Image (tube, rainbow, N blue to C red):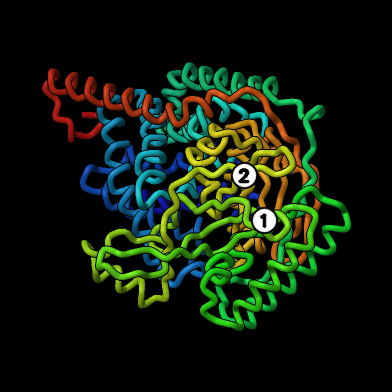
Amino acid sequence: MLADLGLTALSALLFALSFPSFLSDQGWFPLGFVCLAPLFAVVRRASWAAIPFYGLFFGYASYALFNYWLGKFYPLALVIVPPIYAGYFLLTLPALKLADVLFPRHPYLLQSGLWVCYEYFLKTSGFLAYSYGNLGYSQHAFLPFIQAADLAGVWVVSLVTVYPSALLGRAAADGIAALRSEWKKYLLPAAAYAAVFAAVVVYGLASFVDTGRDRQWKVALVQQDVDPWKGGYSAYRKSLDVLERQSARALAGRPEIVIWSETSFVPAIDWHTRYRPDNQTYGLVKELRDYLSAQDVPFVVGNDDGELRRLDEGQDARVDFNASLLFDHGQIVDTYRKLHLVPFTESFPFKKALPRIYQWLVDADTHFWEKGTVYTVFEAGGVRFSTPICFEDTFGYLCRGFVARGAVVLVNMTNDLWSRSVACAMQHMTMAVFRAVENRRSVVRSTNGGMTTIIDPNGRILAGLAPFTEGYLSGSVPVHRGEPTLYTRWGDWLPTVLLGLCAAGLTVGIIRRLRAGRPVRSSPGK
């Protein structure tokens, strides 16, 4: 019991350290290939009665270590997120155990597929969707290895990354003595994996796209390092002063466009222009619009977009959208409203069904946004681009949707300033690397204080700004217009295929076991 608990804790720690963490801002990506081996060993060793406990423990411990910075994001985040993952692994570990029982000699193929199904269907789908911690993202720095994401998204990278852990966990679970006597039976699966791994790397080396002849879009990204969560006129005044000051410096380099971050200017520009509910705030809005009117280049501004709407109760009320606005000479050309809201902190659609939780969130000073409905594609200077906001760049389906509608550059506007954690900002940025590779499109990240970067279609970081500093980044963005990738065309097809294969495998295994007169819940050796 204590040994298995120790192995589970070790796996949780190694998992966290595979990513940018409290020990390394970059993360130790080789650990991603072995970090789950102790957990897979426990899956084999532990009894059915103990498996749910280890699932709860691993889920909670791994995300408490991996997402340690959540405590700064939201007072209730560490109360919400690790327990959710404890619940996920309460379901996932029994499935991994079942695969081991049904196929005691070679469970690792089925277990690897089940892991990807967990990542897609449990953790990145539905209201609670949260992409942080998908194992493939640990490999962000291994560029030849991750190029296969243009075929099947991050999922194919997760699949090839998790397999060694499943194989090693099975091989070592029965002890060193058993491994010494049985090591030959692992030679073929190890050799097969080596061949697959080599093929993935060779594909990656051969599939790098040449951006040397692409149009170079000269952008200026302003990082104001002022937390928009600290509201009030003085905070908004300070932020606008910084934005204007840094933009003036950036404009000296004659960029084609200037991009500010998520909610870089908080007061709703269009709302205050239309209704002018507060003279002091309207004064700031007018100053901003006058400033933008005097500029010769377009600006993209992260902003609260307010709208008057008739509610179900028959009353008119203001609703708000987390938005990005494209300005040209002070006029709003187009608006994008965030499509995928952060659960609990930006959205909680269960007010009537779960009124106590809703009130709990309200009492914790939660500001809810309305959800947008349109995949907006902006155009400026002949470049079509879209602006996924905040953690929207962590979802492949969203960025694929923008590219499929004509975006040739993805511009992520985010605010990671609240964390004051480089590891947090890096974890976010590493997922943007995959969005670039999946769609073979450049990704630009304009952040308030996180990782302001330019990423090329191969996932290379072309330029970056030091996190949590005031400044601006000027750089050239390759505007790559290559043919849509398989991932852009087909989307998240691999998890669906794996789900079908895993379901078929488990079904066949159960039938075979029952025909042999062996209970499914017996241990692997019986």
In this figure, which residue is indicated by the disc labeled 1? 327
Quadrant (top left, top right, bottom left, bottom right) of the C terminus: top left
In this figure, which residue is indicated by the disc labeled 2? 378
> Could you tell me which residue is drawn at 26 percent across and 67 percent down?
314
What is the x, y in percent for residue 31? 57, 42
Front residue of this view, candidates 122 and 98 = 122
Q: Is residue 223 left or right of residue 167?
A: right
What is the x, y in percent for residue 488? 53, 29
Residue 500: image quadrant is: top left
Front residue of this view, candidates 193 and 179 = 193
Q: Is residue 388 left or right of residue 471?
A: left
Circle 1 SS class: strand
**Residue 74 appearing in the image:** yes
What is the x, y in percent for residue 270? 56, 65
Name which residue type carries label 1.
Phe
> Could you tell me which residue is drawn at 36 percent across and 77 percent down?
363
**Residue 23 appearing in the image:** no
Name which residue type carries label 2.
Phe
Circle 2 SS class: strand
**Label 2: few (<14), some (14–19) or many (≥20) C-alpha neighbours in 10 Å:** many
Q: Earlier in the sequence, mark 2 or mark 1?
A: 1
Looking at the image, residue 154 lies above or below residue 202: below
